[in-house]
């Protein structure tokens, strides 16, 4: 039985996305002429950057306001998502996924405090 919480919701959404991305490995690898290692970087770069910067995102939220950092994070994530869609090669896609992780690191701490407020 699942609890309704922001953390679980965001984690399950990420798991769903990651599962969808895993199903597309072959297509992604063929269309961008990438190796399996390159494709793995696409999958893992988001989580790596998110985990590395989530505490920084929380601290910046404390300094500048949770709502402001949440909105900045959403804007960064949206711009990076567009960049993912427009990527012409695997390197651009990995960089865009890393930028998505930066945006998510600003969104996650703020979303939990905004929901409870």
Image (tube, rainbow, N blue to C red):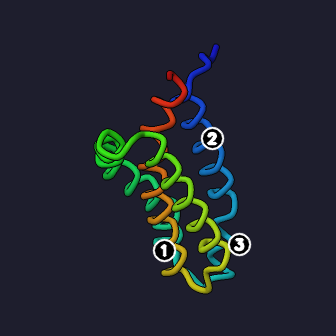
What is the number of the mark on residue 96?
Answer: none
Residue 92 image point, x, y percent: 52, 80
Viewer-nearest of discs 2 and 1? 2
Residue located at (40% from left, 51% from top): 50
Residue on which the image places disc 2? 13
Circle 2 Cα neighbour tier, 10 Å, few/some/many (<14 / 14–19 / ≥20):
few
- Determine the secondary structure under disc 2: helix
Distance Cα–Cα, label 3 vs label 1 = 13 Å
Circle 1 Cα neighbour tier, 10 Å, few/some/many (<14 / 14–19 / ≥20):
some
> Which comes sooner in the sequence, label 3 or label 1?
3
In the rendered image of this protein, does residue 71 appear above or below residue 39? above
Residue on which the image places disc 1? 38
Residue on which the image places disc 3? 27
Q: Is residue 51 left or right of residue 100?
A: left
Q: Is residue 21 left or right of residue 36?
A: right
Q: Is residue 1 left or right of residue 117?
A: right
Towards the viewer: 98 or 90: 98
Residue 101 falls in which quadrant of the image? bottom left
Viewer-nearest of discs 3 and 2? 2
Towards the viewer: 107 or 100: 107
- Determine the secondary structure under disc 3: helix
């Amino acid at each position: 039985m699942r609890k309704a919480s922001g953390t679980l919701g965001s984690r399950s959404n990420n798991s769903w996305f990651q599962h969808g991305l895993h199903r597309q490995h072959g297509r992604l690898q063929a269309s961008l002429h990438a190796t399996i290692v390159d494709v793995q970087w696409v999958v893992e770069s988001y989580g790596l950057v998110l985990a590395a910067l989530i505490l920084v995102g929380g601290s910046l939220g404390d300094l500048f306001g949770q709502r402001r950092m949440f909105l900045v994070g959403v804007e960064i994530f949206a711009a990076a998502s567009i960049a993912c869609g427009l990527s012409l090669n695997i390197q651009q896609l990995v960089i865009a996924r890393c930028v998505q992780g930066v945006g998510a690191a600003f969104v996650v701490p703020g979303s939990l405090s905004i929901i409870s407020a």
